[in-house]
């Protein structure tokens, strides 16, 4: 070891500014030693307890595991000076109070096999000793009204004597001077307001996960949050986001065809945010961060929200404990599924079905003096579209000029809409229940084709157009890597590709709806890496189907004959999400008869 140590120093001496350590033989080699218990406890505390919010999370989860129906959290100085958590749970027996603060002491696991069927929020036995190593902790607990309460204090990880005390059934834990004895951790804490905000976020998430538990959070003499504890998720949402938001939220139920049960609240398409902060995911009532499930929600909203907007949701996924690993992160905010694809599809389908059931029609706003460029408001649909058709809509060829003189009603009446004509070679004008309908021909055709591709995907029966003359397409090195991940998805959408020399693909077949598009341009868009490779089979097909549909649809400014417009409107009425295109733009806007009468002063 001396040889390598000296040799390495000789190399470093050649570097400018190097000051080699003194050479004391074996003394220059680091010695392996056992850390003092107080140092080891401080390191362990840093893994579990990052800030006041971490303390609150662990203590409230313990209260929930204890069967509490009421939990009160009190803060001073954002929790840096004091955190008090009081619950009415089962309490801790006198003989177990001191043991509760020993490392790895827990009532929730007995054997290694129990890790495969965890149903509690906590299980490692790390929370109390980690908190006690980072602060001064006092506890008062009482099991039943007939017993005396028990108290204990722990200072710098050292427990004092167990004593009797007065207190109601349940447990109160007070944490004072967090990280006072670990300055390296305390310096990373933020302002009082910032730390209070983090605690509030933790409490709100736990309240959503357990709506039957009344959660109260105060800071000083100010109440910051309180849930009713009546078991209503919508009431908790109202306490968090306001009653107006709670009324708008849609209920998600288990999908018709899904492996796992998914329930909760999701926002309608008219209610969104500019970031993902409004999405709360729970797996077996545990709040988690999970990239794949977040993508599943976003993909379910594809076609309902414009790009760059995100929904709000509180979704609960129920999974058998033996199909789930919750022991993959120090703070337990991540989980791992044995069958991630099943979890993804269950969430996606539950959200999608809820959105389709409540798909709104866009209503034009007033055209009077207050009209400001056509603001839109979502209203309930005035008529229902039938189930999706099983045939690909094909627009007929241009009509003869004789038809433009004016068709009869019988020729253009389609399932409640009567096509009248075309506006600016972009919008189809139709009459229907309750007023006049303006249909964006590109958005409408795009949604029709997108819906058709999804049906083919679900049935695993893509409609393919074989090419008499295969088309060679050059690709970039990054595209060459990406196509390995997405080739199965492309094939399920109707593409037949094969390698043809260095960075060249030979296209032998395409989706039938792409017969009239530029194949190189479409492939360029499809092969632009946009998602995690692991999500190729479960998410990327939505984005690819949307791109294929967009390239294959009619354009704004393209003149259509009446029979073409009729065919398009008929096909749109059979689409599952007829009111929005895959990119979230509305396909149809209604101008109500009542509004027209008002604007023309007929009422």
Image (cartoon, helix red, strand yellow):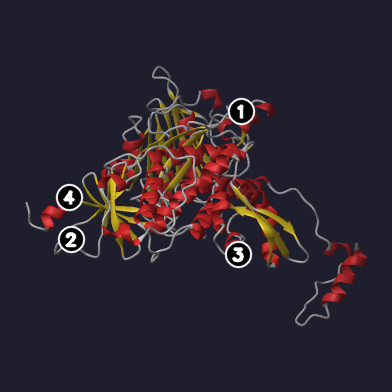
Residue 570, position as x, y percentages in the image: 38, 46
Mark 1 residue element? helix
Q: Can you tell which of label 3 and label 1 is closer to the viewer?
A: 3
Task: Give the distance between the C-alpha atoms of the residues marked 4 and 1, in whole angstroms.
Answer: 60 Å
Mark 2 residue element? loop
Residue furthest to the front: 402
Disc sitting over residue 593 in the figure:
4
Q: Residues within 10 Å of mark 4 (few under 14, many from 20)?
A: some
| Mark positioned earlier in the residue sequence (4 or 3) | 3
| Mark positioned earlier in the residue sequence (2 or 1) | 1
Q: Quadrant of the N terminus?
A: bottom right
Front residue of 273/505: it is: 505
Q: Can you tell which of label 2 and label 1 is closer to the viewer?
A: 2
Mark 4 residue element? helix
Whether residues under marks 4 and 1 lie with C-beta atoms below 8 angstroms apart, the answer is: no
Residue furthest to the bottom: 16
Residue 83, position as x, y percentages in the image: 42, 44
In which quadrant of the rendered view does residue 462 lie?
A: top right
């Amino acid at each position: 070891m001396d040889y390598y140590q000296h040799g390495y120093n000789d190399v470093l001496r050649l570097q400018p500014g190097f000051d080699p350590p003194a050479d004391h033989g074996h003394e220059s080699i680091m010695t392996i030693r056992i850390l003092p218990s107080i140092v080891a406890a401080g390191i362990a505390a840093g893994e579990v307890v990052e800030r006041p919010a971490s303390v609150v999370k662990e203590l409230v989860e313990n209260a929930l595991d204890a069967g509490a129906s009421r939990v009160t959290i009190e803060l001073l100085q954002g929790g840096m000076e004091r955190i008090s958590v009081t619950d009415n749970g089962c309490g801790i027996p006198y003989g177990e109070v001191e043991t509760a603060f020993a490392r790895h002491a827990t009532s929730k696991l007995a054997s290694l096999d129990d890790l495969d069927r965890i149903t509690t929020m906590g299980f490692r036995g790390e929370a109390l000793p980690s908190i006690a190593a980072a602060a001064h902790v006092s506890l008062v607990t009482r099991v039943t009204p007939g017993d005396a309460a028990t108290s204990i204090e722990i200072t710098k990880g050292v427990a004092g004597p167990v004593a009797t005390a007065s207190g109601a059934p349940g447990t109160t834990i007070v944490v004072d001077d967090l990280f006072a004895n670990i300055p390296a951790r305390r310096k990373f804490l933020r302002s009082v307001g910032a730390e209070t905000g983090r605690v509030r976020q933790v409490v709100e998430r736990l309240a959503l996960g357990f709506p039957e538990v009344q959660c109260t959070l105060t800071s000083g003499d100010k109440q910051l949050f309180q849930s009713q504890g009546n078991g209503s998720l919508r009431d908790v949402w109202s306490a968090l986001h306001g009653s107006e938001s709670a009324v708008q939220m849609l209920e998600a139920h288990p999908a018709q065809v899904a492996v796992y049960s998914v329930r909760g609240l999701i926002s309608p398409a008219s209610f969104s945010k500019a970031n993902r902060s409004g999405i709360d995911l729970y797996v077996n009532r545990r709040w988690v961060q999970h990239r794949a499930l977040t993508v599943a929600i976003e993909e379910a909203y594809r076609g309902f929200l414009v790009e760059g907007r995100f929904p709000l949701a509180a979704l609960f996924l129920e999974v058998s404990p033996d199909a789930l690993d919750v022991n993959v992160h120090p703070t337990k905010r991540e989980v791992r599924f044995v069958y991630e694809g099943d979890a993804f599809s269950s969430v996606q389908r539950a959200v999608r079905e809820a959105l389709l059931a409540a798909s709104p029609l866009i209503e034009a706003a007033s055209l009077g003096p207050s009209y400001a460029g056509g603001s839109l408001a979502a209203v309930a649909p005035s008529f229902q579209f039938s189930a999706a058709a099983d045939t690909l809509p094909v627009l007929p060829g241009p009509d003869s000029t004789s038809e433009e003189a004016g068709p009869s009603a019988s020729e253009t009446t389609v399932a409640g809409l009567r096509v009248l004509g075309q506006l600016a070679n972009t919008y189809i004008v139709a009459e229907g229940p309750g007023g006049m309908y303006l249909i964006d021909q590109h958005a409408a055709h795009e949604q029709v084709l997108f819906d058709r591709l999804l049906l083919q995907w679900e049935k695993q029966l893509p409609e393919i157009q074989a090419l008499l003359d295969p088309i060679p397409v050059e690709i970039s090195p990054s595209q060459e890597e990406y196509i390995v991940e997405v080739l199965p998805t492309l094939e399920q959408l109707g593409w037949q590709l094969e390698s043809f020399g260095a960075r060249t693909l030979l296209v032998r077949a395409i989706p039938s709806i792409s017969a009239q598009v530029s194949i190189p341009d479409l492939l360029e868009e499809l092969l632009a890496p946009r998602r995690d490779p692991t999500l190729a089979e479960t998410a990327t097909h939505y984005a690819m189907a949307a791109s294929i549909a967009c390239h294959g649809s009619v354009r704004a400014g393209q003149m259509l004959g009446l029979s073409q417009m009729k065919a398009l409107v008929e096909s749109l009425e059979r689409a599952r999400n007829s009111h929005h295109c895959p990119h979230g733009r509305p396909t149809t806007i209604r101008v109500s008869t009542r509004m027209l009468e008002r604007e023309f002063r007929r009422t």
